[in-house]
Image (tube, grey):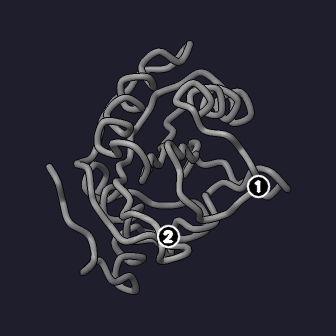
Amino acid sequence: MRSYIGIGSNLGDPVAQVRWALAALAGIPLTRVEQVSSLYRNPPMGPADQPDYVNAVAELETELDARALLAELHHLEAEAGRLRDGQRWGPRLLDLDILLHGREQVDEADLTIPHVGLPRRAFVLYPLTEITPSLDIPGLGPIRDLLVGVDGSDLIRLG
């Protein structure tokens, strides 16, 4: 199963946090990292009184179903020191999101695939397009069509 994971951090050393997460994804059982985007710096989506984020996207090949993969991602977040306090869009040591999991479409209280913010977030669309420019997103269409309506001028590619 091809899965795409959004990675973000804006606390501590965000670049180091994202790089740690990219390496840690390779340790998930029955999972292999196929591609990794560049890192991008961008302003926070939520409250403005927090540091900029560093984001990236990883493409995985996994035998895990979406629920098992989500559990592994939550484990990695906890290992990095993230405490889930229910706050949305606040500062994070590490945030790992399943953006896509094959062609699955899931709409449940704690899991939405494709990720609910995917079609509107430049910090997801740009790195995702970088590694899979011809991607067709279930229920949303070609990724290139989604990019047309998203302003990426605040993104700074870090390499």
Which element type, helix, strand or loop, lies under badge 2?
strand
Q: Give the image location of residue 128, x and y in percent.
A: 36, 55
Q: Give the image location of residue 135, x and y in percent.
A: 39, 57
| Image quadrant containing the N terminus | top right
Which element type, helix, strand or loop, lies under badge 1?
loop
Tag nearer the camera, 1 or 2: 1
Q: Residue furthest toward the left?
A: 159
Left or right of 61 in this view: 79? right
The tag on residue 17 is: none
Quarter location, residue 29:
top right
**Is 86 above or below relative to 94?**
below
Q: Give the image location of residue 91, x and y in percent.
A: 53, 57
Report the residue marked by disc 1. 86
Front-lying residue, 97 or 79? 79
The residue shown at (31%, 56%) is 127
The tag on residue 141 is: 2
Q: Give the image location of residue 125, x and y in percent.
A: 38, 65
Q: For the residue marked with disc 2, what is the amino acid?
A: Gly
The residue shown at (58%, 46%) is 98
Q: For the residue marked with disc 1, what is the amino acid?
A: Gly
Q: Residue furthest toward the right?
A: 109
Mark 2 is surrounded, within 10 Å at the Cα level, by few (under 14), some (14 to 19) or many (20 or more) other residues, namely: few
Left or right of 145 in this view: 71? right
Mark 1 is surrounded, within 10 Å at the Cα level, by few (under 14), some (14 to 19) or many (20 or more) other residues, namely: few
The residue shown at (38%, 59%) is 53
Left or right of 121 in this view: 105? right
Front-lying residue, 15 or 30? 15
CA–CA distance between discs 1 and 2?
31 Å
The residue shown at (54%, 46%) is 95
